[in-house]
Image (spheres, rainbow, N blue to C red):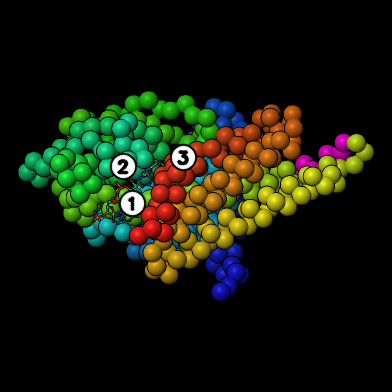
């Protein structure tokens, strides 16, 4: 067992740190206030090879692994968790579906543009009545000659209004439930696609999340990923990777808030001494530090399992659960430790607390992660 980062992993961390300082830190509070997406930062992620980090160079990737990828999201999310999720959706969900199940034509045509940062990808699974129960998808795709005709809608689609491409899950055989779902690569400029409400969110406010409507959208049959009926497994597989992305986002948020609190406790004096000299606060920080390190080990272990070709469904679920609950706890405590200042926007921890909340919800609520883990215990 080796806990040392490799030279390549350290280099990824340094590259992302520099990128976040140059492109994400400036204006992070204003973007949160105004719900503005930092498109130049996204383009730079592409230019530096970070979007395609864990994928093969022949498809525009960087040929690294998931370990490098989770390190990148962790660094990004220390500063701006909105970009953490936008990036994760492009890499894990959009990239994962096509890379793991797509044809050679699909990989060559649809991966490089997103990995280069010129285009954005999204992932359309969730519908008003298909949230935790992803088998409830009612969007339909009906085969007509060389096309599938898509009708229905998606909600809570991250990158929805920005995306050039979306992986859409639709039923090609409604009676078959999960075995009737199919996955399609949809070009978002196809006639019949309409972006609905752009959500006004509690947190990750500069990420763009929307409804998407499909009315008689013609999708070439070549854009079916894998075979008809394989969509549910494609979605679940991509989400196993995505859950590591969300776990990394959570750990990044936790570490970002922890560092703000650490500096504050050393600088601020009350009752004639710096705050950290109150044992309650020093011990509280020790407890949070231990929780961050525990959760991080689960995350790195999950990435290690994936990079070594082993099953990572359960490790990813455990990592997502632990890291995102840690994010919520650390950010809540950080606001408390900063007191009145913590509650104000300028110190960032209140933003981080709002951002942390969604990590316990999307890409499978933490209750769904418990379902996945308990299913693996009692089988
Ligand atoms: N990988 C591959 N296949 C899997 C799998 C996995 N991780 N998990 C399940 N499957 C397969 C099963 O083996 C089974 O196959 P067979 O029928 O051949 O045996 C099939 O899928 C059905 O499995 P289940 O019976 O376990 O399915 P279920 O209906 O009980 O659901 C669930 C399981 C875990 C609850 C699943 O529905 C789930 O993960 N729900 C949460 C959905 C989710 O994460 N949504 C997030 C959407 S993305 C998002 O958040 C938006 C964004 O943009 C960020």
Q: Is ligand 1 less than 8 Å from the beta carbon at label 3?
A: yes
Dot 1, how many residues are within 10 Å of its Cα: few (below 14), some (14-19), or many (20+)? some
Q: Is ligand 1 less than 8 Å from the beta carbon at label 1?
A: yes
From the viewer's perspective, tell me whether residue 249 is left or right of residue 242: right
Residue furthest to the bottom in view is 1
From the viewer's perspective, tell me whether residue 15 is left or right of residue 343: left
Residue topped by disc 2: 134
Residue topped by disc 1: 236
Residue topped by disc 3: 361
Residue furthest to the left in view is 145
For the question of whether residue 323 can be seen, the reply is yes
Tag 1 and tag 2, C-beta contact below 8 Å: yes
Q: Give 12 or 229, whichever is nearer the viewer.
A: 229
Find residue 295 and report its horizontal and vertical position in percent.
57, 55
Q: Quadrant of residue 1?
A: bottom right
Residue drawn at (68%, 49%) of the image: 288
- The local secondary structure at tag 1 comes to helix
Residue furthest to the right in view is 272
Q: Which residues are magenta?
A: 263-270
Query: Of helix, strand and loop, which mostly describes the magenta segment?
Result: helix
- The local secondary structure at tag 3 comes to loop
Labels 3 and 1: the sequence-earlier one: 1
């Amino acid at each position: 067992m080796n806990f040392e980062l490799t030279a390549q992993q350290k280099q990824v961390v340094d590259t992302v740190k520099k990128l976040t300082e140059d492109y994400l830190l400036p204006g992070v509070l204003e973007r949160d206030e105004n719900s503005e997406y930092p498109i130049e930062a996204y383009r730079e992620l592409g230019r530096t090879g970070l979007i395609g980090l864990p994928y093969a160079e022949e498809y525009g990737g960087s040929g690294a692994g998931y370990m490098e990828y989770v390190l990148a999201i962790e660094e990004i999310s220390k500063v701006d968790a909105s970009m953490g999720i936008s990036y994760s959706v492009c890499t894990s969900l959009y990239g994962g579906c096509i890379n793991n199940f797509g044809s050679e034509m699909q990989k060559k045509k649809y991966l490089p543009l997103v990995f280069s940062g010129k285009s954005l990808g999204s992932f359309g699974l969730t519908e008003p009545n298909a949230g935790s129960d992803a088998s409830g998808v009612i969007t339909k795709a009906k085969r007509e000659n060389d096309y599938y005709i898509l009708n229905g809608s998606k909600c809570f689609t991250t990158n929805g209004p920005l995306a050039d491409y979306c992986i859409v899950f639709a039923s090609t055989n409604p009676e078959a439930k999960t075995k009737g779902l199919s996955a399609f690569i949809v070009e978002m400029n196809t006639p019949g696609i309409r972006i609905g409400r752009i959500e006004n969110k509690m947190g990750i406010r500069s990420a763009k999340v929307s409804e998407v409507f499909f009315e008689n959208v013609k999708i070439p049959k070549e854009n079916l990923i894998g075979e008809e009926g394989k969509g549910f497994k494609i979605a679940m597989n991509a989400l196993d990777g995505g859950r590591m992305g969300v776990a990394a986002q959570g750990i990044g948020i936790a570490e970002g808030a922890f560092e703000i609190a650490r500096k504050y406790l050393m600088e601020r004096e009350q009752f004639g001494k710096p705050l950290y000299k109150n044992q309650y606060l020093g011990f509280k920080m020790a407890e949070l530090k231990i929780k961050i390190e525990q959760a991080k080990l689960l995350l790195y272990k999950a990435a290690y399992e994936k990079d070594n070709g082993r099953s990572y469904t359960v490790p990813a679920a455990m990592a997502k659960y632990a890291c995102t609950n840690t994010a919520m706890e650390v950010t809540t405590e950080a606001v408390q430790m900063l007191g009145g200042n913590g509650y104000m926007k300028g110190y960032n921890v209140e933003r981080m607390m709002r951002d942390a909340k969604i990590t316990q919800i999307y890409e499978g609520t933490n209750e769904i992660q418990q379902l996945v883990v308990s299913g693996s215990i009692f089988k």
